[in-house]
């Protein structure tokens, strides 16, 4: 597997080849994704929900993102690493936005950053690009805007918002993003957007016609408890397997059957005798 870059992703769209992306938040998962041949590992601010135990992504800080990005970068060689810019890291001022994006590249080791928003983020995106930092856009259902949206709702179902999403995508393309995540968008609208822009689209709850797909790895492995979005397919159901393994461990420790002889280190009996 050759090193995945922004140019590789653009070439995939031109050739009609799909782009694969999954989230990763730690070294071990990153290694697994690389071994499997994933194109992009996204260090998502979804780390707040699935790893740190927050209700949503809004509590995630820059320090959190740098910490987890470092871990993921250590686990890959050829997989591209994109790091999310968390809430308020690109909302206050353009200098702060550039500085924070720079941290994810310089300290975290990511190859690119992702931030949410459409036309209202163009100036910030241009400034980050001027600092030689590649940017992935993200429009549609943008989780950092959960309170503004009044919940996690599909976006673009009426004429006005559908037109707005098309305009947002084209504005991000003009600004210079190398790809755009489309989240929670009707499939037909996502297909229309994908066909009208030259940069790759990566869908999550946006149908099969995007240039690529992304899911939260905890969701697709069946580790997430409680509600999961409609667009999630569980490619495995690891939670019950892990639960049974932990219960079996507890039972064997309590019964004294673990550790068994094959799990123990030996020592010359004469040495033990001389201790008494």
Image (cartoon, rainbow, N blue to C red):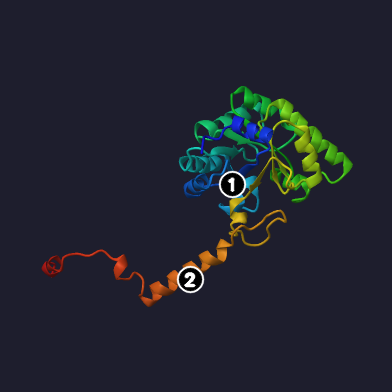
Q: Residue at x 72, y 36 (%)?
A: 117
Q: Earlier in the sequence, mark 1 or mark 2?
A: 1
Residue 66 lies, in percent from the top left, at 53, 39
Residue 100 lies, in percent from the top left, at 58, 32
Above or below 207: residue 122: above
Q: Residue at x 49, y 34 (%)?
A: 107
**Considering depth in this image, is 7 or 57 the residue closer to the camera?**
7
Q: Which residue is mark 1?
A: 23
Q: Quadrant of residue 169?
A: top right
Label 1 crowding class (10 Å Cα cut-off): few <14, some 14-19, many 20+?
many
Farthest residue toward the top?
Answer: 130
Above or below 271: residue 69: above
Above or below 79: residue 237: below
The residues tagged by marks 1 and 2 sit, at their Cα atoms, a distance apart of 28 Å
Residue 50 seen in the current view: yes
**Considering depth in this image, is 200 or 46 the residue closer to the camera?**
200
Task: Tell me the SS state at disc 1.
Answer: strand
Residue 90 seen in the current view: no
Q: Which residue is mark 2?
A: 247
């Amino acid at each position: 597997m050759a090193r995945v870059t922004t140019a590789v992703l653009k070439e995939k769209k031109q050739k009609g080849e799909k782009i694969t992306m999954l989230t990763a938040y730690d070294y071990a998962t990153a290694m697994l994704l690389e071994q499997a041949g994933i194109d992009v590992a996204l260090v998502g601010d979804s780390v707040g929900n699935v790893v740190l135990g927050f209700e949503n992504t809004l509590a995630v800080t820059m320090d959190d993102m740098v910490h987890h990005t470092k871990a993921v970068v250590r686990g890959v060689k050829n997989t591209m690493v994109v790091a999310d810019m968390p809430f308020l890291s690109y909302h206050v001022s353009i200098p702060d936005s550039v500085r924070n994006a720079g941290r994810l590249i310089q300290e975290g080791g990511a190859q690119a950053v992702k931030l949410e928003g459409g036309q209202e983020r163009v100036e910030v995106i241009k400034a980050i690009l001027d600092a030689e930092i590649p940017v992935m856009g993200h429009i549609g259902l943008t989780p950092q805007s959960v309170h503004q949206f009044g919940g996690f709702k599909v976006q673009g179902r009426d004429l006005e918002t559908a037109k707005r999403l098309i305009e947002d995508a084209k504005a991000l393309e003009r600004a210079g993003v190398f790809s755009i995540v489309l989240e929670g968008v009707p499939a037909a609208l996502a297909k229309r957007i994908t066909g009208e822009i030259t940069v790759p689209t990566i869908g999550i709850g946006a149908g099969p016609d995007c240039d690529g797909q992304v899911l939260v790895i905890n969701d697709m492995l069946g580790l997430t408890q409680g509600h999961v979005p409609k667009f999630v397919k569980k490619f495995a159901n690891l939670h019950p397997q892990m639960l049974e393994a932990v219960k079996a461990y507890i039972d064997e420790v309590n019964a004294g059957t673990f550790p068994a002889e094959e799990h123990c280190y030996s020592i010359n009996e004469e040495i033990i005798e001389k201790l008494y």
